[in-house]
Image: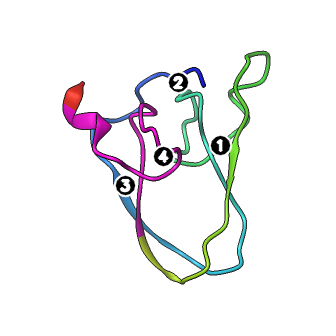
C-alpha cells in the first residue's frame, strides 16, 4: 500500500464510539485530520473505514506512514 503525505508528526488521541463508522484519511491531504474530507479525489487513495468494538480513546495516525493504518504504530518517530 502506498503511503500518504505526512499530515502530522504525532498521533491524535480521539474518543471513538463503538459501532459508529469513521473514515480515516489515507492520503494526508484532508484539512480535517485524521478524517477524510474528500481531498483524495483524483488520486489512488481512498478513505479507510474505522469501526471499533469498544468506546474509548484511540491513537489515530496522522503521519500516514503506519503499517497499521488508521492506528498509530510509532512510525512518526522515524520521520
Residue 20: where, in percent of width, then height? 71, 74
| Residue 27 - label | none
Question: In 3D space, how far apart are the residues under numbered discs 1 and 3 (Cα atoms)?
Answer: 14 Å
Q: Which mark is residue 4?
A: 2
- Name the secondary structure under disc 1: loop
Q: Is residue 9 above or below residue 3?
A: below
**How far, Cα to Cα, is label 2 from label 4?**
13 Å
x 39%, y 34%: residue: 63
Q: Residues within 10 Å of mark 4 (few under 14, many from 20)?
A: few
Which label number is shown at residue 68? Answer: 4
Crowd rating for badge 3 (residues with CA inside 10 Å; few <14, some 14–19, many 20+): some
Answer with mark 1 or mark 3, whichever residue precedes in sequence. Answer: 3
Q: Quickly name the residue at label 1.
A: 36
Q: Which residues are magenta?
A: 58-77
Query: Quadrant of residue 53 in the image?
Result: bottom right
Q: Provide the residue designation for mark 3.
A: 12
Amino acid at each position: 500500500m502506498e503511503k500518504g503525505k505526512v499530515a502530522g508528526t504525532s498521533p491524535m488521541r480521539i474518543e471513538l464510539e463503538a459501532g459508529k463508522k469513521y473514515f480515516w484519511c489515507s492520503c494526508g491531504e484532508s484539512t480535517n485530520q485524521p478524517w477524510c474530507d474528500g481531498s483524495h479525489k483524483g488520486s489512488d487513495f481512498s478513505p479507510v473505514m474505522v469501526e471499533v468494538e469498544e468506546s474509548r480513546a484511540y491513537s489515530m495516525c496522522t503521519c500516514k506512514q503506519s503499517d497499521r493504518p488508521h492506528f498509530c504504530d510509532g512510525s512518526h518517530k522515524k520521520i
